[in-house]
Image: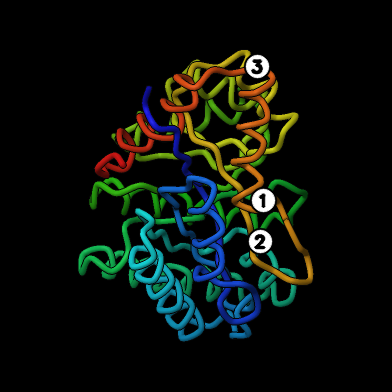
Amino acid sequence: MKKLVFADGHLHTNPVKGMGIKVIAKKFAELGGWFVVLVSLPPHHLGLDNTFEGYVKAIDILVNECKLSRELGLRAVCLAGVHPAAIEDEVSKDVKHSVEILEKVFKVLNYIAKAVREGLVDGFGEVGRPHYKASPEAFVINSIVTRYTLTLARDLDVPVHLHLEQGGELTAIDIEDYVKLLGLNRLRVILHHVDVVTARASQAKKLMFTVPGKYQVLREIFKILKPEYMIESDFIDDPKRPGVSSYPWNIVENQLKLLNENIVDSEYLYKVNIDTVVKVYNVNPP
């Protein structure tokens, strides 16, 4: 029987204010964790200003966390981006300078593209659209940023994680249009933290996505979807909001619980946690 190990398809670490990868990797590995996708946090989460220089420092912290995770025995993919909520926050405070905010985001994304070419990071994440009501200016900027980042990801042939509204089939239709219009590799475009309805619509269009590893979500997902997606904790490593959205070890515990309840079998979990990961990120299996 194949050894069952686990991947976390999207999480954040905060070595400044939270546990950081040293603690997270140890606890995750103890439960069979083998692979993580580490995604950048907005600078203000790390006690930095959301300036260009702040983003550069935040990316440096991310790169070091990825390096440490590999030294601690985890396979790691490192993604950097500009979160749509960070853009919304800036625009809401200074809407008159929306164009300047957009230009700064372009500068950050071009810096990330340079870091990709230098082998420091592996792709983009996360960018996208707010999943809550936002100002028109912030929505437009995020739409422009999404398109620009997808174009960079296409040209560099690297993955990009999209933070999106939970729009079900409408969201899937829109992202499929992006894939077709921009000539994107479907495997490289990952819809992050989707709900059950959006997951089902995305799989019908052969789009890649991650689902939150919460017990009730997985219980439903396992019954209706092929194992052609990934599970994520979306952990933000913020001591003021402990366990949001899940701890990486929680998503392992939930999968094992559902395995013991015969809701899912080990072959299905193997495909989700290893086969899909290898296919999407071109990493060697454990």
The residue lying toward the viewer, choosing from 282 and 1, is 1
Query: Helix, strand or loop at disc 1?
Result: loop
The residue lying toward the viewer, choosing from 223 and 266, is 266
**Upstream in the sequence, badge 3 or badge 2?**
2
The amino acid sitting under disc 2 is Ala
The residue lying toward the viewer, choosing from 42 and 152, is 42
User: Residue shown at 76%/63% (left/top)?
Assistant: 242
For label 3, the residue is 263
Task: Rate crowding at label 2 as few (under 14), some (14 to 19) or many (20 or more) other CA atoms within 10 Å.
Answer: many
For label 1, the residue is 130
Q: Nearer the viewer, mark 1 or mark 3?
A: 3
Task: Rate crowding at label 1 as few (under 14), some (14 to 19) or many (20 or more) other CA atoms within 10 Å.
Answer: many
Query: Helix, strand or loop at disc 3?
Result: loop
The amino acid sitting under disc 1 is Pro
Residue 176 visible in the picture: no
Q: Position of residue 101 (x, y in %)?
A: 55, 73
Q: CA distance from mark 1 to mark 3?
A: 33 Å
